Image: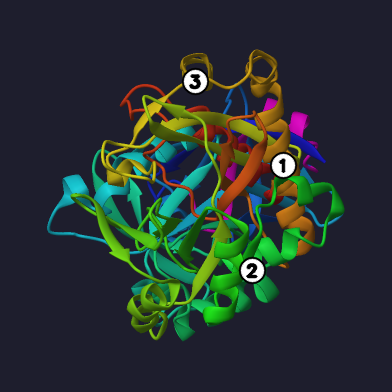
Amino acid sequence: MSKLKIPVHTVYSGILQENAVMLGDRLIKKLKIPAHGPILLAFGSFRQEVTVIPVPRSDNLRVSEGLARKTGFKARNVLNASYSSGSRTLRLGPLIGVLVSREHPERPERLFGPITLFCRELTNACHAQGAFVYFFTPEALESTGSSITGWVYDEGWKQSKLPIADVINNRLTTRKAENKPSVQHFLSEVKSRYGTHFFNEKFLDKSEVFEALRRDPSLQRYLPESHLLGGFAILKKMCGHYPVVFLKPVRGSLGKGILRISREEGGGYRLQSTTPLGTRKQSYPTLTKLYQAVAPKMKTTRFQIQQGLPLMEIGRRPVDFRALVQKNGTGKWNVTSIVARTAGNNHFVSNLARGGSLSTVREAIGKSSIPPGAKESANLQLPRAALAIAKGVEANIPAHFGELGIDLGMDQSGRIWLLEVNSKPSKNDNTPLNDTKIRPSVKQMIQYCRYLAGL
């Protein structure tokens, strides 16, 4: 199979019929396209038989306006192209679809809310890599055939009909949207009918992750003791074993709803909870009384009870690490970035949404009081742990993930622990967005899409 990156231009329909394309002589030779007989032109789920008209001294592919309307091509694109002689198919792309939660057509500058700039950045990165990306919401799936209504950026956001993508990235931010029958039906349909690859296909529950990883003996050293909170007995057992335990909503995110339970010096127990303004503290004379206060929450929220860890600190504020682990252009897991997150004042969680701040791993480790030997090995051990955990998730949880946000803690002796795995890592957390610079994480995502699509 021969591959090239070629400019695709749209020409007036009077010049060219819809079932014909014009292709430069040199490109025909490089792609090894036969001189006679029709070939199949493919772009995502779109397929059409076309006759190739050779054009001397041309380095582009020209298609008619009618054909461009069917594919969603803009006036000028640069796309990867590959020709398969066995199926006589010229494929262009990859065509990438990004499933997002909502759209705001009345606010074009913030069309997709807080991820609008990321969507622009992804569009720019696709242009650079010869891919084509569009964005769509669950509402677009209510009635769909072999095409879908999506948004593309071309000197402004525009809606158009597009083929089903070769690869779809799930950026839905709620389980409710993800579990809609229209979404689930669409995903199973496009996988079976068009062979579409769909990654980050589901949210992860905390209990699911820890149960799955516990099956891998090589990962157990990273796992704090963790159980589903079923009643008072497990709370009593865990509080008997550890001076601090955490109750984390199984389906929580952004540090919301986390409870910290600790023993007080004079007897009794302290319960700390996260609020937007800081930490709320309450004291109880017995664990039974504390449990009675927490029990009503358990009627609507499932909690994971987890061993509290004496995390490394900077100025008495706990620090953890967010690793972004992604599949690369050869389909292998790769650590794209790791940042340190220091909790804000009056907070015991480090999420940016709760006032946390970012720094490099080296800066954070340098300011901490962990032993010198652990400081030296941290830059090696953190990515090693993140990579092992990503591979463990893939091996033990039956779903397709292309990227994972892995939260790691380091205790005051330098030991590394897993805190959480997020299958929808934020696109604004790791580095400031910049209109001109494309982040490595965005480039890597497209390289993985190209790998999946074989383009």
Q: What percent of the width, then of the height, locates residue 313?
A: 45, 29
Look at the numbered discs 2 and 3 and tell me whether their residues touch, using CB distance below 8 Å: no
Q: Secondary structure at mark 1?
A: strand
The label shown at residue 82 is 1
Mark 3 surroundings: few (<14), some (14-19) or many (≥20) residues within 10 A: some
- Residue sitting at x 40%, y 68%: 174
Q: What is the three-letter code of the residue carrying label 3?
A: Ser
Look at the numbered disc 2 and give the secondary structure of its residue.
helix
Give the CA distance from mark 2 to mark 3: 32 Å
- Say which residue label 2 marks: 208
Residue 129: x, y in percent?
A: 55, 32
Which one is closest to the eye, mark 1 or mark 2? 2
* Residue 257 in the image, given as x and y percentages of width and height: 35, 63
Mark linked to residue 368? 3
Corner quadrant of residue 38: bottom right
Residue nearest the observer in this picture, 63 or 262: 262
In the rendered structure, which segment of residues is drawn in magenta? 16-34
Residue 53 appears anywhere in the view: no
Q: At label 1, which amino acid type do we have?
A: Ser
